[in-house]
Image (tube, helix red, strand yellow):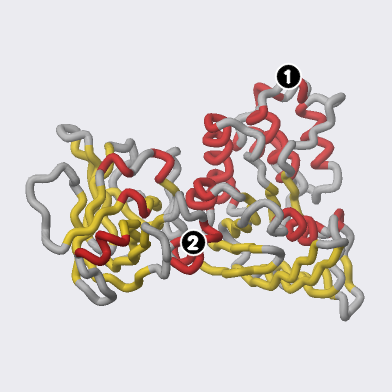
Amino acid sequence: MIEVDVQFRRNDFSLDAAFSAKSEGITAIFGRSGSGKTTLINILAGLERPNTGRIVVDDAVLFDSSAGIDVAPERRRLGYVFQDGRLFPHMTVKRNLIYGRRSAPSGTEFDAIVRLLDIEPLLDRRPGTLSGGEKQRVAIGRALLCQPKLLLMDEPLAALDAGRKSEILTYIERLREEVRLPIVYVSHASDEIVRLADTLVLLSDGAVAAVGPLEDLMSRLDLRPLTGRYEAGAVIPVTVARTRPETQLTELVFPGGTLLVPATDLPAGHAFRVRVRARDVALSLTPPDGISMLNILRGTVTEIGDDSGPLVDVLVDIGCPIWARISRHALDSLDITVGKQIYTLIKAVSFDRRSLGYGAAHRVSEQTG
């Protein structure tokens, strides 16, 4: 387990964060700029000292103010990947990697890490000649060669364009699957979190607003201000049933039935997650006929947002929670109330490749972007 209960004060900023999470998979710390994400991960690393509190990783006490324990950063056995890589410009890639290995226990498999991150062609180059994505792969390799018990990643994709982000996301997923290394991942980008996270820690104004499985927290209406209203929507665990070449559609099964999405190259049986944005879901009192929408799923209204504006969020149980964002006029004219049976309508094209993420229960090795 990762157990954190810390209080930190500096000038006008204060952080009071308490949470626990399993030390497996990826624990994502998510929140807006200024919420305390980097301060919290720096406290975990030992780069910032909390005023009071306690930090435990797999029964190892790293900090305990009441017991006078404050393990030095270099002795915490935590790898750290920063936003900018922080490679030594005068060293080759190989020397940068070996520097990270210097304090590692014996038996570190240098060649295995190089192969995992596909950085063998870069070994004789210097950081100034590398792309942003290549630098981050080398930074990840250096952190891994310290044989950490836990890998910390602070907005590692913030400075990368969309193409490089997708590239690095794939390698982070490979780390989780092949190295089985627990990761604490900081980000303010919901697409990264949906794709990577197993456990989500939501930070707001220096405090933990919620902790839990990603699917649960992303489906809560009360957390919309923190998870992002415009991009808000449900996260649904699915499994590939089959792809129909004649229609160029893939069938995804989930607890409520089947979803049709644009054809993917994922094989049958692979499980992952899809994000369905609330703005892409329509509602109907009766099963519609003669329309272009391919996904029509019956459910029960479980919650209606308390929005005072022209748009209202409606949560529907279709075997799992799904959101719809509709006009207040539609809510009133259809007399939509909690407990009412209703049909949700979702266009197949709503599932763009950025909506696809990897699930926690079953893993896939192919990139879905």
Type of amino acid at the residue the image marks with label 2:
Arg
Give x and y (percent) for residue 252: 27, 50
Q: Secondary structure at mark 1?
A: helix
Residue 339 image point, x, y percent:
25, 76
Q: Is residue 245 visible?
A: yes
In depth, the one of 36 and 155 nearer the eye is: 36
Pointer 2 or 1: first along the chain: 1
Q: Residue at x 48, y 65 (%)?
A: 217
Image side of residue 51 versus residue 17, left or right: right
Disc 2, SS: helix
Residue sitting at 77 percent across and 57 percent down?
Answer: 39
The residue tagged 2 is 224
Label 1 Cα crowd, 10 Å radius (few <14 / some 14-19 / many 20+): few
123 on left or right of 71: left
Q: Nearer the viewer, residue 258 or 7?
A: 7
- Read off the residue under disc 1: 129
Regarding residue 213, the answer to whether it shows in the image is no
Picture mark count: 2
